[in-house]
């Protein structure tokens, strides 16, 4: 029983003197202390009439009454007597690092308490006078420990010097610490305890917050895992349903083919039967004629000859031929085309989906990127979160800045390492492939080099690398400036076709020229705006390295001379050569025309009826008076049309609702005829039921030899 009580001894100890409670009192917050300890504490720390519990720091506006707790005092007496009996039989020798009793003779018994007044340590036996003798009861007992003393005055450290942040004795206040900000150690201890309590509270709150974060993270991870499983299951389900859908449509098509086959075979069977009947009749007639020819009686022969001749009817019997409504060779080709389109579409769309999934995983921050690494924006990133600035996909910088723009801000997940061993960029754009002797120039994307332009150096200047330093600086000899110093990442290799000095191509650009952005420029210095690499505009103004261009898509566009190239007036794709009467179509690069498609497609070819500024009116076979932009159209030459020639079998395209020169008497989409003459864009066709039919070449399509006119044309 005693051992059980001693095992819980700490809950019966005063938190001030660390000994078993003596004359225990309980304050309103519920904590218990020795009457003398709490009284001394509150007398010493009476600040502004506020009294605090040393443990929970609860404040009381007035000093609570200290009444002795009788029940708790009796428990303490029983516990103390039991502890004394046990301690007398359980006293042990002081081990290494433990404090020994200063009053035990002979064996070094382990001390349990130290007195700050006596500056001595006591075992359980020798400490009893401090509990019984009135004069010693006022001494301050603490758990057995080495009592710190002032090394200079050999006195107790009772004062805390805030100036020097250390504990000192009373004598130190008169010499080394005279005039310093000092307070009793108990006050400083209490104040620091308050701060530590606040810190402890904040730590507990932080722990609770982190535990909530961990709990939420566990839930999120589990949810993410479940989401991935559902995504896998959904993917399997969707693709399975897609396969079933294709199989269903395949079966429907097969049934349709079989139905068409049956219809054609039924027609053929009827023709076979009719033809067989005619053959039977003809054989009967042949027999009659044979018998007549064998007759020797002239009178009978002549008499029967007239009757046989009148009964036989016309010798011109109708001819029969099997002409099926459906060409299964055409169906085979259509199925092959469909399979090709499906395969292409599936490949493209699935690749897009896979790439998007890869991009999602690529957003995971690559924590291996550290300050000092060479990096660039990933090719898969179309637009960085914090914008391009002057940076491009080709820009390579050190994690701190880019040569084109200092202190550029990006997202770690959008960047990738660039090693000196090479990269997937072209040799021209990879600065780490540049070596001594190479021809180089400043990149168009670099507005101002780190070490400035120097004398007569521009974006068009081409020089020879003379030296490359270990810090990635480079020394270049330009024609007008020898030993020019630059940064390796600001340079690009120049081809052998480039001149040493100003570019002859760039220098030829003048006001009024038609120009476009060079294919080698990924992103122009002043951004794309509404233009693209295919946009062609007219130079309106040139000032130094800058120029202003009017594009059909954007007026007053600002660019840099070195980023532009001249477009010859006879070059392909130049919209300004389009005029009224020309045959045109929408450029393949235009995804959706500005004024929408209507019934027009990329394959539609029409005639320009009117041009006003940048707009034009086109008559397409599928859509009359269609409105578009000149810059979105391209000329169509005879070579772009179907290669139809005299003698070819043709028919009107299924996409043509009404031919330009109308259908004629018996011509339909199924009518097949032969080309008799071609005059410019007009074509003359002989159909079975309409000879000399006039049409337009772009409205016709070739017909395979296996195709026939439903009306019976060849």
Image (tube, helix red, strand yellow):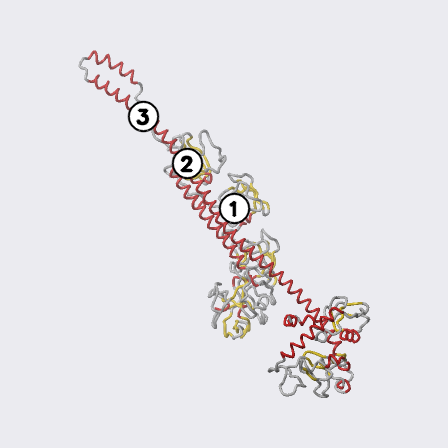
Quadrant of res 688? top left
**Residue at figure coordinates x 19%, y 15% from the top left:** 295
Callout 3 touching callout 2 (CB < 8 Å): no
- Report the quarter where the N terminus lies: bottom right
Relative side of 613 to 648, left or right: right
Q: x%, y% of residue 373?
A: 54, 69
Which dot, 1 or 2, sits closer to the camera? 2
Q: Measure the alpha-carbon separation of dots 1 and 2.
A: 39 Å
Circle 2 — which element? Answer: helix
Quadrant of res 168? bottom right
Q: Which mark is residue 255?
A: 2
Relative side of 225 to 17, left or right: left
Q: Which mark is residue 86?
A: none
Quadrant of res 73? bottom right
Q: Measure the alpha-carbon separation of dots 3 and 2.
A: 30 Å
Relative to residue 315, is residue 190 depicted above or below? below
Callout 1 touching callout 2 (CB < 8 Å): no
Q: Which mark is residue 586?
A: 1
Q: x%, y% of residue 113?
A: 68, 80
Badge 3 or badge 1: first in the primary sequence: 3
Pick whichever, 291 or 94, lies toward us.
94
Which dot, 3 or 2, sits closer to the camera? 2
Relative side of 284 to 416, left or right: left
Which dot, 3 or 1, sits closer to the camera? 3
Can residue 507 be seen in the rendering of this structure?
no
Pick whichever, 336 or 240, lies toward us.
240
- Report the quarter where the C terminus lies: top left
């Amino acid at each position: 029983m005693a051992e059980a009580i001693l095992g819980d001894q700490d809950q019966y100890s005063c938190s001030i003197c660390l000994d078993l409670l003596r004359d225990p009192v309980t304050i309103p917050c519920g904590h218990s202390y020795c009457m003398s300890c709490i009284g001394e504490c509150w007398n010493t720390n009476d600040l502004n009439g506020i009294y605090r519990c040393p443990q929970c720091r609860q404040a009381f506006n007035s000093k609570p009454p200290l009444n002795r707790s009788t029940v708790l005092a009796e428990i303490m007496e029983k516990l103390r007597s039991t502890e004394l009996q046990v301690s007398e039989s359980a006293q042990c020798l002081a081990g290494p690092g433990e404090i020994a009793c200063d009053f035990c003779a002979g064996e070094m018994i382990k001390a349990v308490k130290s007195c700050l007044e006596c500056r001595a340590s006591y075992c359980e036996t020798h400490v009893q006078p401090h509990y019984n003798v009135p004069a010693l009861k006022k001494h301050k007992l603490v758990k057995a420990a080495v009592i710190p003393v002032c090394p200079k005055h050999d006195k107790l450290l009772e004062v805390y010097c805030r100036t020097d942040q250390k504990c000192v004795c009373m004598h130190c206040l008169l010499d080394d610490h005279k005039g310093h900000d000092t307070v009793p150690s108990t006050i400083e201890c209490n104040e620091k305890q308050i701060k530590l309590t606040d810190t402890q509270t904040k730590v507990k709150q932080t722990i609770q917050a982190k535990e909530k974060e961990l709990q939420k993270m566990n839930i999120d991870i589990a949810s993410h895992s479940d989401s991935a499983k559902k995504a896998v299951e959904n993917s399997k389900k969707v693709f399975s349903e897609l396969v079933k859908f294709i199989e269903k449509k395949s079966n429907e098509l097969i049934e349709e083919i079989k139905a068409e086959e049956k219809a054609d075979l039924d027609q053929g069977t009827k023709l076979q039967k009719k033809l067989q009947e005619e053959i039977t009749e003809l054989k009967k007639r042949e027999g009659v004629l044979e018998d007549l020819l064998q007759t020797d009686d002239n009178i009978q022969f002549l008499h029967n000859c007239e009757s046989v001749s009148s009964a036989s009817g016309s010798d011109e019997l109708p001819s029969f031929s099997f002409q099926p409504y459906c060409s299964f060779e055409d169906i085979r080709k259509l199925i092959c085309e469909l399979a090709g389109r499906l395969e292409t579409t599936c490949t493209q769309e699935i690749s897009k989906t896979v790439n998007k999934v890869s991009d999602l995983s690529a957003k995971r921050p690559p924590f291996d990127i550290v300050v000092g690494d060479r990096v660039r924006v990933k090719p898969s990133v179309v637009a960085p979160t914090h914008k391009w600035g002057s940076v491009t996909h080709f820009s390579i910088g050190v994690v701190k800045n880019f040569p084109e723009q200092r202190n550029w801000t990006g997202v770690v997940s959008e960047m990738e390492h660039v090693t000196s061993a090479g990269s997937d960029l072209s040799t021209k754009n990879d600065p780490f492939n540049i070596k001594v002797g190479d021809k180089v120039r400043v990149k168009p994307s670099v507005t101002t080099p780190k070490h400035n332009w120097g004398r007569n150096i521009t974006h068009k200047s081409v020089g020879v690398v003379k030296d490359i330093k270990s810090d990635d600086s480079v020394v270049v000899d330009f024609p007008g400036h020898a030993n020019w110093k630059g940064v390796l990442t600001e340079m690009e290799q120049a081809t052998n076709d480039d001149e040493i000095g100003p570019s002859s191509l760039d220098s030829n650009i003048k006001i009024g020229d038609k120009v476009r952005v060079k294919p080698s420029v990924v992103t122009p210095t002043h951004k794309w705006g509404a233009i693209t690499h295919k946009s062609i505009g007219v130079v309106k103004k040139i000032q130094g390295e800058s120029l202003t261009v009017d594009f059909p898509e954007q007026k007053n566009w600002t660019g840099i001379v070195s980023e532009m190239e001249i477009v010859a007036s006879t070059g392909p794709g130049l919209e300004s050569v389009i005029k009224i009467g020309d045959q045109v179509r929408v450029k393949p690069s235009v995804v959706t025309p500005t004024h929408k498609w209507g019934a027009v497609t990329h394959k539609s070819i029409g005639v320009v009826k009117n041009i006003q500024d940048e707009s034009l009116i086109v008559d397409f076979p599928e859509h009359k008076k269609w409105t578009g932009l000149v810059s979105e159209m391209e000329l169509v030459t005879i070579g772009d049309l179907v290669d139809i020639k005299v003698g070819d079998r043709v028919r009107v395209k299924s996409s043509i609702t009404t031919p330009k020169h109308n259908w004629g008497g018996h011509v339909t989409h199924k009518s097949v005829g032969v080309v008799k003459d071609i005059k410019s864009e007009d074509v003359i066709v002989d159909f079975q039921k309409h000879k000399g039919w006039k049409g337009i070449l772009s409205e016709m399509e070739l017909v395979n030899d296996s195709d026939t006119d439903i009306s019976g044309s060849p």
